[in-house]
Amino acid sequence: MFFGARLVVDARELTLAAGRWTAVVGPNGAGKTTLLKALAHVLPSQGSVHLLGRRLEEWPAKARARALAWLGQGEPGADDLLAHDVAMLGRLPHQPWLAAPSVADHAAVERAMRRTQCWEWRDRPLGRLSGGERQRVLLARAFAVEAEVLLMDEPLANLDAPHQADWMLAVRELVASGRTVVSVLHELGMALHADELLVLQRGRPVHQGACNDPVTHAALRDVFDNRIDIHKVAGRWVVLPR
Ligand SMILES: Nc1ncnc2c1ncn2[C@@H]1O[C@H](COP(=O)(O)OP(=O)(O)OP(=O)(O)O)[C@@H](O)[C@H]1O
């Protein structure tokens, strides 16, 4: 992937496992967002990206939007829209042109908003929510798609600890039902609870492996210049800066 003439991400032959949760990690500027945008078809890439075995370009746009849900980093939203309407945007790929949302669409939105605990303020405009509340609405929009594959860039931004835990639980449920989740995470302790870690450094994937594998931990320490410590506390991974 290039920005102008500059090669920003050089990821050849990269496969992300279906039916698993992969966390993409690495230092600032490593290319995590760029990679995710290329996977989501938000940014052009030079190679070819396959989604569920089929080239992205070969998917009819609406079918692709049903199969692949995308949550960008710090997404601007229309501040005047009500939270419920924002979440309903996730159902657009399911709706015929100019049709009103169906019963199934309303049910999916309610499920998603309850999942991220924002159903209570469904009638409030996005612009009048706190950062974390807003993020939970945007997460609900992504969940409401009920896609096979979810790509989320910094989904935990602005979320407090209990809602981070809720997000992880939601991801676990999605993966248990056969869905694929790929998330860029700066919270390395959370990332280590994924199934797989993809470690990026200066635009290249330098390691891909199981989160509980010591080799993965060594790769992680390495890309952060040995300035992190990884511990297991009460059965959970904790990453501390050094
Ligand atoms: N629109 C752009 N134009 C030019 N270069 C860009 C653009 N967006 C990002 N870059 C550069 O591409 C590289 C990768 O950026 P990217 O946002 O993918 O990194 P990241 O790993 O997600 O970083 P962070 O952890 O800081 O969010 C960086 O060197 C960045 O400066």
Image: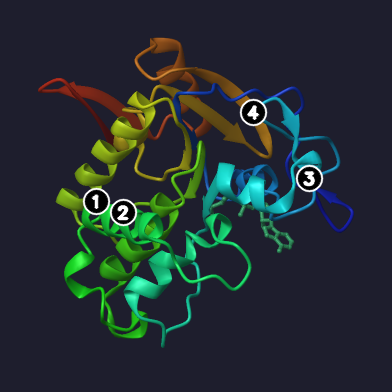
Q: Which residue is mark 4?
A: 52
- Say what amino acid the circle numbered 2 marks: Ala
Disc 2 element: helix
Which mark is first along the chain, 2 or 3? 3
Task: Find residue 49 and name its label.
Answer: none
Asked if 202 appears above or below 143 in the picture, the reply is above
Which mark is first along the chain, 3 or 1? 3
Which mark is first along the chain, 1 or 4? 4
Question: Crowding at label 4, few (<14), some or many (≥20) Cα neighbours within 10 Å?
Answer: some
Residue 45 lies, in percent from the top left, at 80, 45
Distance between mark 1 and mark 3 Cα atoms:
35 Å
Distance between mark 2 and mark 4 Cα atoms:
24 Å
The answer to whether 221 appears left or right of 63 in the picture is: left
Residue 118 lies, in percent from the top left, at 23, 64
Disc 3 element: loop
Q: Which residue is mark 3?
A: 1
Q: Which residue is mark 2?
A: 112
- Say what amino acid the circle numbered 1 marks: Arg
Nearer-the-camera pick, 203 or 19: 19
